[in-house]
């Protein structure tokens, strides 16, 4: 009896140590979405030895079928004679959890093909893969990594999702999760500090592709592109500068948005030659520039929850070329009205669904006003249901270049390039400890409220919302700045 009990204990320990294989067979044999499962595609009639098998890795809030449902990437790879595989990672977990999982499963994929694979990863999938390579020992199984619009330095849309004004909407949509939290720019600066100086970082070559198209007015990624335009060229979800790494080779930056960049008919031909053995003769591995474009402060944000009716006011300065008013809601049928300072009413908002990954499930009610009248504008919204909303007003104005924010030694300061500016700033910090939100209003240390000292809230991401109101040439204006900082357990600050 004792021997049987001892054998059972050993068997149980073995089962806990050795993970069960979650290989799921052909993509025809199962449905996607279970973390750790992987699938292989059909084998082409003729596969050249020079062609490495491809492992496709999905991005944020996605799954493995993103490569073959409403996407010709798998079909294109097959037609070009490549063996393929697809894996499901956790759609809502950090790069640490997904990196560890991918490093385990890629060994099985390596054994299936009998050789290394080339990983083609979309969006956050590139970060998950680099985490597996650098921190979890996946290098023996991966020949090289090709990233398609991966936010290597995070996304300002993730910052926005965790900000005070957007939290009402992001929370109800399910956008607040471990994955989005880890993509805040402050946290990604910390990840880069742990990764870029690691001895494993140069073992596997990385190649990058970035996009510059957000789509036409009213398209699914238009709003994301509009918000990110203040941070540089982007594809509606990720800026070009974030898609680059200083030690990676940039294959191309092209006219793709965050969706089309992963479609076979759009980009397979662009990175096709980097799937083969002879790629080393084609590339010098010259480092690419990752310098960020100058930031422009052109957004004004408000948000919350209401039942029945909500009203928001926006000060528009003289000389603005245009303002786009975007009422982002969890209700498609919300009734939105824009009222100008001279009481003219507009209700011609275009309504479209969001596809930015960060606010998926929201609806945009959008209208653009060219050469707007200076003064106080008003938006009224009404809904039969409780509505969670985010108002984003985007200004095309010369004033955008005259305001900035500086961070140094725990001090946050709103700056202006014109002595005629009169600024008043309110700063709120959203900080999560043990999964619970701690929101803190920070008092300025200058009489004019422009400078702030970060409070000591412990290790984590400090998501700072700075609401700027002021006057310039007798005209009032509003702007909102969202900035994130990661503070480690030693009190060191990481930010971009």
Image: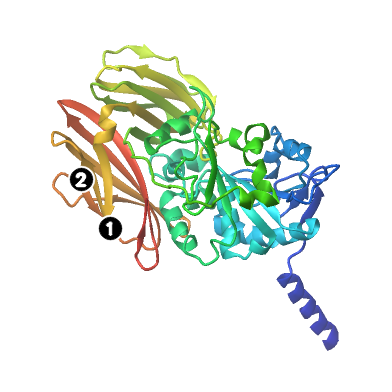
Q: Report the side of 254 relative to 314 (left or right).
A: right
Left or right position of 292 against 98: left
- Between 245 and 262, the residue placed more toward the observer is 245
Q: Which residue is mark 1?
A: 410
Q: Which mark is residue 73?
A: none
Which of the 4 image quarters holds residue 23? bottom right
Q: Which secondary structure lies at badge 2?
A: loop
Q: Is residue 60 visible?
A: no
Q: Is residue 131 above or below residue 220?
A: below
Residue 450: which disc?
2
In primary-sequence order, the first of circles 2 and 1 is: 1
Q: CA distance from mark 2 to mark 1?
A: 14 Å
Give residue 135's position: percent from left, percent from top: 56, 64
Residue nearest the viewer, comparing 400 with 112: 112
Q: Residue at x 80, y 84 (%)?
A: 6
Q: Nearer the viewer, residue 366 or 416?
A: 416
Q: Secondary structure at mark 1?
A: loop
């Amino acid at each position: 009896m004792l021997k049987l009990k001892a054998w059972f204990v050993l068997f149980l320990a073995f089962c806990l140590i050795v993970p069960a294989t979650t290989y799921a067979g052909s993509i025809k044999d199962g449905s996607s979405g279970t973390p750790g499962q992987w699938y292989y595609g059909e084998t082409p009639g003729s596969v050249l030895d020079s062609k490495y098998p491809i492992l496709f890795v999905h991005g944020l809030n996605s799954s493995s079928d993103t490569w073959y449902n409403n996407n010709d990437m798998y079909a294109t790879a097959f037609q070009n004679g490549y063996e393929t595989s697809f894996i499901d990672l956790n759609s809502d977990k950090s790069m640490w959890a997904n990196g560890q999982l991918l490093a385990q499963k890629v060994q099985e994929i390596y054994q299936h093909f009998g050789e290394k694979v080339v990983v083609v990863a979309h969006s956050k999938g590139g970060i998950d893969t680099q985490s597996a390579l650098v921190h979890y020992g996946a290098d023996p199984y991966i020949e090289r990594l090709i990233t398609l619009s991966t936010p290597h330095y995070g996304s300002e849309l993730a910052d926005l999702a965790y900000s005070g004004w957007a939290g009402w909407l992001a929370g109800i949509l399910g956008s607040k999760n471990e994955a989005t939290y880890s993509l805040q720019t402050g946290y990604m600066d910390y990840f880069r500090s742990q990764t870029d100086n690691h001895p494993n970082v140069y073992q596997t070559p990385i190649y990058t592709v970035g996009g510059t198209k957000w789509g036409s007015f009213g398209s699914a990624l238009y709003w994301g592109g509009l918000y990110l335009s203040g941070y540089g060229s982007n594809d509606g979800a990720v800026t070009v500068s974030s898609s680059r790494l200083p030690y990676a080779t940039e294959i191309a930056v092209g006219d793709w948005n965050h969706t089309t960049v992963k479609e076979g008919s759009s980009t397979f031909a662009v990175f096709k030659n980097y799937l083969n053995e002879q790629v080393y003769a084609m590339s010098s591995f010259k480092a690419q520039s990752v310098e960020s474009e100058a930031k422009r402060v052109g957004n004004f944000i408000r948000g919350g929850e209401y039942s029945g009716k909500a009203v928001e006011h926006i000060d528009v300065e003289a000389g603005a070329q245009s303002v786009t008013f975007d009422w982002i809601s969890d209700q498609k049928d919300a009734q939105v009205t824009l009222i100008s300072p001279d009481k003219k009413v507009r209700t011609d908002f275009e309504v479209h669904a969001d596809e930015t990954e960060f606010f998926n499930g929201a609806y945009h009610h959008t209208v653009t006003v060219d050469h707007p009248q200076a003064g106080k504008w008003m938006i009224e919204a009404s809904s039969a249901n409780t509505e969670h909303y985010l108002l984003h007003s985007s200004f095309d104005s010369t004033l955008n270049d005259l305001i900035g924010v500086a961070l140094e030694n725990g001090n946050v300061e709103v700056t202006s390039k014109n002595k005629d500016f009169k600024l008043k700033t309110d700063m709120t910090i959203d900080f999560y400890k043990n999964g619970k939100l701690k929101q803190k209003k920070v008092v300025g240390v200058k009489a004019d409220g422009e400078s702030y000292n970060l409070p000591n809230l412990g290790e984590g991401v400090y998501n700072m919302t700075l609401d700027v109101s002021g006057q310039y040439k007798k005209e009032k204006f509003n702007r909102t700045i969202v900035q994130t900082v990661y503070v480690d357990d030693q009190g060191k600050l990481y930010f971009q």
